């Protein structure tokens, strides 16, 4: 008989959220496949779990998955965990699951903590329907394009974000969705410094102004409603640069630097564009 692949949820911060079933399964498994074995070793030590560990992550999944599947076909039980929360949410667990199912090996969920459901439960926004988008693109242009595609989504939207990009991302959300859209920023869920900032876009931005957020961040955004006016189309970068130089009287250096901060575009590219605009303006005089 083949073994079983157990998808085991682990705490997202507070170790008291570990379920009794999860502890038992991790103790009884033949091997635990972990995203970061160093991180998981601390968890296992706390609960006195001595099961052997092996690494399974995005960079080794294609080589490691067949090895784990082969062990399960021989009768071994494998427990899959991620660094925090429920595996397969924004991590490569799905790849192992697909390989396991194709091999005819059972897959069993050991449910528990999840940053997605934890944030939804306290956000104060509708939860009858929602969509999870994981991490937005880190590059500003790609992020804005993704947000533009989500602007008309009627369901509540859940995102993950890195703390150093949080304010810029919320500014981009406000630009794409409109300033009246409600949002909840959930930081360090279940940990000592847990914080939930709720309100409309400008209110949340004001609350975060001057702060340097730390820790894991989950963003919950109100879905599009008929009474919410869509955001105005974003002014093309070249037109914004032209207005800043021609209308506002900024120097090319000042305008390109400010626009680079606001848009995430490369400052040198904007400077070259500004020089070309200034030269073209001189030639037409």
Image: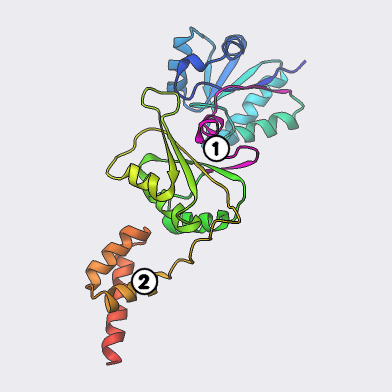
* Front residue of 245 and 247: 247
- For residue 157, above or below residue 20: below
Q: Give the secondary structure at mark 1.
A: loop
From the viewer's perspective, is residue 64 above or below residue 125?
A: above
Q: Nearer the viewer, mark 2 or mark 1?
A: 2
Q: Dot 2: within a 10 Å radius of its alpha carbon, few (fewer than 14), some, or many (20 or more) residues?
A: some
Tell me if residue 278 comes above or below residue 61 in the rendering: below
The magenta region covers 106-134
Quarter of the rendering occupied by the C terminus: bottom left
Instruction: From the top left corner, tell me how far across and down residue 221 is, in percent.
Output: 52, 45
Q: Earlier in the sequence, mark 2 or mark 1?
A: 1
| 219 on left or right of 150 | left
Q: Which residue is labeled 2 in the image?
A: 240
Q: CA distance from mark 2 to mark 1?
A: 36 Å
Residue plotted at (74% across, 18% down): 2
Q: Nearer the viewer, residue 121 or 19?
A: 121
Residue 275 in view (yes/no)? no
Does the magenta segment cover residue 124?
yes
Q: Secondary structure at mark 2?
A: helix
Residue at 40 percent across and 27 percent down: it is: 194
Res. 90 mark:
1
Q: How many marks?
A: 2
On screen, 276 above or below 22? below
- Residue 237 rendering spot, x and y as whole percentages: 39, 69
């Amino acid at each position: 008989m083949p073994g079983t692949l157990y998808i085991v949820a682990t705490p997202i911060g507070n170790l008291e959220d570990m379920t009794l079933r999860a502890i038992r399964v991790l103790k009884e498994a033949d091997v635990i496949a972990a995203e970061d074995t160093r991180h998981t070793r601390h968890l296992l030590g706390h609960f006195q779990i001595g099961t052997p560990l092996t690494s399974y992550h995005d960079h080794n999944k294609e080589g490691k998955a067949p090895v784990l599947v082969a062990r399960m076909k021989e009768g071994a039980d494998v427990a899959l965990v991620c660094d925090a929360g429920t595996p397969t949410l924004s991590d490569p667990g799905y790849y192992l699951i697909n390989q396991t199912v194709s091999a005819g090996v059972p897959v069993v969920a050991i449910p528990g903590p999840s940053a997605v459901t934890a944030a939804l439960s306290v956000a104060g926004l509708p939860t009858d329907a929602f969509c999870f988008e994981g991490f937005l693109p880190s590059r500003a242009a790609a992020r804005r394009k993704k947000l533009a595609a989500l602007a008309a989504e009627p369901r509540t939207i859940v995102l993950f974000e890195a703390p150093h990009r949080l304010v810029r991302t919320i500014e981009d959300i406000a630009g794409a969705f409109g300033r009246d859209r409600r949002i909840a920023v959930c930081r360090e869920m279940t940990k000592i410094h847990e914080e939930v900032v709720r309100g409309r876009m400008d209110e949340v931005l004001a609350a975060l102004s001057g702060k340097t957020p730390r820790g894991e961040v989950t963003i919950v955004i109100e879905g599009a409603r008929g009474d919410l006016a869509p955001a105005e189309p974003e002014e093309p970068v070249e037109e914004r640069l032209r207005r800043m130089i021609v209308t506002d009287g900024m120097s090319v250096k000042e305008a390109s630097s400010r626009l680079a901060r606001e848009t995430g575009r490369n400052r040198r590219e904007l400077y070259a564009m500004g020089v070309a605009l200034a030269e073209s303006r001189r030639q037409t005089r």
